[in-house]
Image (tube, grey):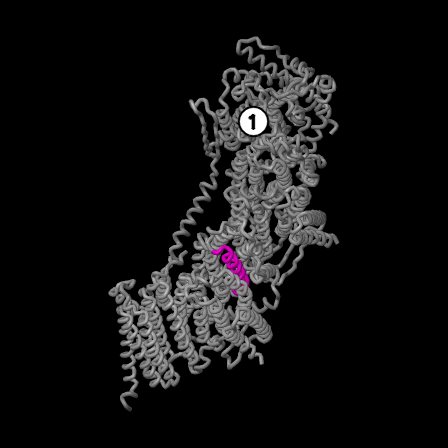
Amino acid sequence: MRSLVVPALIQFLLFLLIAPLVTGILRTMKARLQTRRGPAIWQPYRDLHKLLRKGMVIPDTASWLFSATPYVVFLTAAIVGLMIPMVVTVAPLSLFGGVLAVVYLLALGRFFMALGGLDAGTPFGGLGSSREMTISAIAEPALMLAIFTVAVSANSTNLTDMAKFAVSQNWRFLAPSQILAFGALFIVLIAETGRIPVDNPATHLELTMIHEAMVLEYSGPYLALIEWGASLKQLVLMTLLVNTFFPFGLSRDWTALGVTAGMGFYLIKLLLLCCFIALVETTNAKMRLFRVPELLAVAFILGALALISTFVF
Amino acid sequence: MPGMILFVILAIPLAAGALSFAARKRPAMEAINVTAFAVLFLFTVALAVEVLRVGSVSVWYGFLYADSLSALVVVLTAFVALVCSIYAVGYFRHDERHQVFEEDVLGSVTIAKLRKYYTLTPLFVFAMLMVALANNLGVMWVAIEATTLTTVFLITFYGRATSLEAAWKYAMIGGVGLSLALFGTILTYYSAYPVVGTDSVAGLNWSVLVKNASQFDKASLRFAFILILLGYGTKAGIAPMHTWKPDAYSEAPVPVAAMLAAAVLNCALYGLIRFNVLAAKCLGPQFGSQLLIVFGLLSIGVAVPFVLVQRSFRRLLAYSSIDHGGIMILGVGFGGAFGALGMLLHMTFHSVTKPLLFFCAGNIQQYLKTDLFRRANGGLIYSMPVSGSMFLMGTLAVTGTAPFSMFQSEFAILRAAFDRALFVPATLCVALLAAIFAGFLVHIAKLVLGADPGLPPAESCPWKKYPLVGLGALIVILGFWLPSPVFQLIRNAARIASGEP
Amino acid sequence: MNSALTGYAFFGGLLAYGVGAIAGLLASGKPRLARALCCSFALLGGLLEIGACGLSLLGSVGTHWDISAGVPFLVYGFRLDALSTYFNLILSVLATAVSTYSLGYLRSLGETKPAGLLGFFYNLLLLSLTAVFTASNAFFFLIAWEVMALASYCLISYEHRHQATRRAGILYFVMSHAGTCCLWVGFLLLTSRAGRLDFASFATVAASLTGPWQVAIFLFFFAGFGVKSGIIPLHIWLPEAHPVAPSNISALMSGIVIKTGIYGMARVFFEFLGVPPLWAGMLVLIVGVVSALLGVLYALMEHDLKRLLAYHSIENIGIILIGFGAALMFISLNQPRLAAIALIAGLYHTMNHAIFKCLLFLGAGSVVNAAKTRNMEEMGGLIRRMPQTALGFLIGAIAISGLPPLNGFVSEWLTYQALLAGFSTTEPLTRILFPLAGALLALTAALAATCFVKAFGITFLALPRSESAEHAQESGLSMLTGMVVLALACVVLGLGATLFLPVFDGITGSLLGTRISGDLIAAGGLALTSGSIRGGTVSPAGIAALFVIVSVFPSLLWLIWGRKTKRSVGPTWDCGLPGLTAENEYTAFAFSKPLRMIFAALYQPQREIEAEYEVSPYYPKAIRFESEIEPTFEKRLYDPIREFILAIANRMRTIQAGSIHAYLAYIFVTLIVLLLWGVRS
Amino acid sequence: MHFYQDPQFGNRMLTLMAAFVLVLQIAMVGQRWLITNIRIFAAQSFLLAGIANTIAYFNHAPHLYIAAFLTLALKALLLPILLERMVKKIDIGQEIAPLINVPLSLLISGGLTTVGYVVAQSFHRPAETASPASLGHNTLAVAISLFLIGFYMMISRRKAFMQVLALLCLENGLFLAAISLTYGMPLIVELGIFFDLLVAVMVLGILVYRIQETFDSMDVSKLSRLRG
């Protein structure tokens, strides 16, 4: 048990640092693609720093739940971060939970976020939580099928074993089931992190915002925790996507050399994924809320095909 | 002299009838009636104990013969008569107080009416006892014909036009049915003639016939059994001969209706069992059970639609007794060890449960002045707590829900069916019973439960309340515990009914 | 010695229930005394039963006692084997909690209603439930089963003044009786095969069951027990009956009474059926998935709090049946180890659902009692007025949505592992069915989370929407202790899952012949594994510990910066309107609007809008809006059947049309037909 | 041996009387006047008494004489007088329109006679009847047809009085069956049956009178208010 503490600490710190960076990079890439200069990539660090020190206004109707939500959101995202393989195939705390635990911990964070939104008593909060819960509910089966596809070939839901299995297979990612699963998981990533086709992170227009609506009433340190939690969650999903389908560069164990090499590969892979996401965001307009289920139905079909193809081909 | 007890049992009702005829005032008649039937019940219990000890009691060269089967029927008849006589006291006092008799078309004074009831009922009970105790099948037929004749004027008791109509149908269909039965008896005597013909006095005695039933003439006994089944089936109210029952039970005064529903049904089925034993011995069990199963299922099937869309709770109870007649016929039809035992258990429990239902219906009808569901707007449990709750409990008992005893007998009958691999009739029977339960519950729950309509509280007369509470307690106890002598009597009777020596 | 002690405890418990019932009946005159007596005896009974089950689990599993009554073939046979003890344990835990809760709840019911009668039927229900779980012969089982149905009927129609209650009571009893008739036929089939009535002889004859016998027995029992547990096509009584019953009773009913169906299925499918055909397991699995999905979809559309919880019972029964279906399929593919995992998943979810559903219903009962209404749209802001009840309800909500680290998550995780293991079987059809079932189970769990966000958010958070919600007070001590007991049970069963698993060894040993709880525990009892060598692991205790450890970082941030920040309480942002009121809040109906749009094919929503206006339709004086979803099962399936039967019955009434000639003609025709038949044969 | 001791002659007489009884029965089906019907019934009972006597004489069954005498006294004399006095008191002459028209009724009666023969044929054992004046299956066949036609007459008649009369013809059929099959039932049973018959007629008479009083017509099809 003691040998897990150091890797856990390292991975925890790495996660905390890289998460806002990824959000910054994405924001700048999108700006550049829209021929704007856009803010510097470490702008999110400044925002967090500012928010942590700003004053906080708590709505009078809110209960203890309102102030508990930021902590829960941040903690669930951070814990999940420790359970997935980032630079080393062996995730520090994979014993505590496999991919199912990851999905359900994120669901716990979402559950509290929705309640926090409702607690303020504004229609925006209710609107946001209703849409957020609906979309994530519809995304769930597609996510589960994609996970089943990967888990079935590695015949375990433990991420470490899945990573180890993926590394041992060469050119694994070209198998049709992997590509279809990647497609399904990518759509779910877009839906979960609230990217353009599903939800516009930058807007305050009540017609379109989902994620923003829930956090409208938060300010100061609470908002900082929530923003940080959100970017942590985004990084978790991106890491999950990257390391399960393109596992090269993951080192075997927690040696200093292995970690730094793994780190390099990991950052490159992240950068590529950010470009792909930014590309998708800029080329698509936001979908009408009731066409989102069709997109998620596509994800579900992709997941099902991936599953069938594991034993057909 | 054990045989004397049979004479005493038959003598008591006759004496009661004569005394009531002579009595002047109502309390005298009531007293005679209740005490007579109480003493009668004690004697029948004594007879049952005697039969348990000795096996069978007979007197006057076997003219009156009581084995455990007839002892059981006699005890049940006496019990039903006793309970009805206790309830009748309260019932007729209520009628008298509410001048029900004044608008009687013949305008006869109430005391004449009551005298008619208090003299005819003992004769009616005498006839029923005679059925069970007569060894000679011809005399049994005469006794059953006597039950019909004595009850015709009890049905026209209230003198309404509809009760006249009910009485006419009762008399006519009863008459035709019993002539069929007579024809059957003649044919039985004819088929037994070559074997037993010379002894013209004891020729038709059941105890004689059963000994050498196997040598009877098969062809004529087959017709005899068909005619008997139709004949006594009419008295038992088996479909398609059941049409007189709903009219007679809804028009007759409640004590009479209860005795008709509980006691006469037993006597008719007793006759059927006697002949079924002979037929089984002579023709083999297959012939009889085929017919009995078809008629049993038909009776339950006919009862279902009328229970589902019934408008009056008095007629609902009539269809319930048709349904129970059908179940008992099925019991005899399935045969085997469990079939006969289940049937006789069912007869015993039915004779206890059915009077309770009729008394509750009587109380409610007298209180609401109608027996139509749509006129009673529910919530009776507030104004009539005892009758309402007993009615609900009785409904659950009579539809065979588990904690009550009818479930055990129905389970035994169905087990007999499954042991003989008769899956389709048994499953059909279970489905029909479920439908009847649904119909009953919907009607009675709507009548008893519901918002408090604010009617004045009704249950003042103890005579009408205590029989209910007594019977209710008895039913609950029977559900969980059956005194062993009673079960011993029923098992011996079942052994006779299934044809073992 | 151990089994003697178990005997004393067990029969002591039964005696306590009996005395409680009689006390309720005798003291029905004085409500206060009746209330105290009934609930305390029920509590005593519950505690004694827990003792009995504990002792039985520890040592003397399988002790049985037979008491014969005068009635033929009725032997009061009790048997505490592994399965019976497990279900009896659930029952007694619930009985204890609900009894403590009832002490306070009945006081708040007011003096008018006959509390004694409620006490009588409540104790009768507990007595019959214990008998159902521990009966050792078919006849006694059926009697206990029907007494339970009878007691439940009387409890459901306790407030029979309202029309809806009466209708619900009748519907419940009629459907339950139809189910019992299926059980009759099933048990009779078994009895005719085994020759005797007791379960032991059924088990011995199970191996020789083949072909049509097995199919008939399976279908009859599945229908009979399915009606009682409320699987989809036979569920219409459940959302009607549970809400109208007094809340402590609906808690008990949703918690354990529908579990009698699950107990029956477990007993029959795994003990009396031998090796079932593959399609049987598939049917159970498919019915489970459909029940789960439709249960939660209908729950989402409810804004009556207790109906919502009732629909959720259907959903969780579906999840349990997914476990059972998978187990049945593994048995027919002769993989006992996987079958054991699936069975443990199903049984564990039975226990979990009993606990958190009872907790939720008790919470709902307190809320409905305080807010004097069952409609969520008239509640709100109760978390400030009833903090402890709100916390209890929240724990229940988290558990039912299957969120870590509570017990709902553990049993759903086990179910996923069972489904995942199913993928490795060779049968092509099952390789597709299991993951699909897994995906739909995930959808169900997510929708359940959505539904409970709505339920909790609208009921407890923000501003009270009605006068009565405004003046709601926290419920009494006894009601809170009832809920606390269950909330603790949720947490303990969640975190201490690995400690609880050995309990199932007895059951899987007796039913499937394998004891695999050892393989499910890893890392010294900290984590749960899926049984296969490199299977996934999860450790609820670990996750909870992580929550504590990782929260060091945000608290560090708080120490550095947060403490100094100025914290002020201000009105919620109201876009410049004159202050937010309760009307601006989101309603339950609006919350479920997106899902109603997405699943419109299932719901067939109808909507009416009436606007009153004088001058032009664009300036309406008042708008009335009404929308409702179509009760598909009632409309499409049950109403047509009922109409058809009543139509036939009406047409059959012409038999008794009053003319004596017709009556005589019936007899005449029968005579002629029979005579000719006599001639021919 | 005188001609009247010759069994052959007895057999002929029996078949002749039985045939007459059947003809009278069918005539009754066609007849609409009440008084004539009562007289036909009386004649039929008289013939039955004759049959009983011949059988008793030839088979030396003493108790049959009592039965014959009772039939003669009761059914041939006493009952018709009682019934006629009742008909005069109610003074309703005839049944205007019976339920089923007369020609069809006669056809049905013919059909029922054939059914009677078929049934009698199937189980009668001519060989065993020891006595030379073996009663032959025709009297049994006539008895069954009498029974069936009586039953049919009850169905097809509207008047309550006629239904009572039909019931009595039914009884006649039974009596004929009894004497032809087993030389009459045991005495105690015969007495019981006659006693029951007498009481039944009295009871039904009172009922008919009450119906006439309440519905002021004897038409039974009016009695149809009890339904369902």
> Which residue corresponds to the image point at 50% horizontal and 58% vertical from the top-left?
B366
Asked whether B263 or B30 is in front, the reply is B30
Quarter of image, res B217: bottom left
Could you tell me residue B373's position as x and y percent? 47, 52
Asked whether C342 or B171 is in front, the reply is B171
Q: Which residue is mark 1?
A: C583
Q: Amino acid at mark 1?
A: Glu
The crowding category of the residue bearing disc 1, from other C-alpha atoms within 10 Å (few below 14, some 14 to 19, many at least 20), is few
Q: Does the magenta run of residues contain B351?
A: yes
Label 1 secondary element = helix
Q: Magenta segment, which residues?
A: B343-369
In the rendered image, the quadrant that contains the N terminus of chain B is bottom right
Please identify the residue farthest to the left as the structure is shown. D103
> Which residue corresponds to the image point at 45% horizontal and 27% vertical from the top-left?
C612
Q: Is residue D152 above or below residue C496?
A: below
Asked whether C508 or B414 is in front, the reply is B414
Question: Which is the main secondary structure of the residues drawn in magenta?
Answer: helix
Could you tell me residue B80's position as x and y percent? 53, 66
Q: Is residue C100 above or below residue B18?
A: above
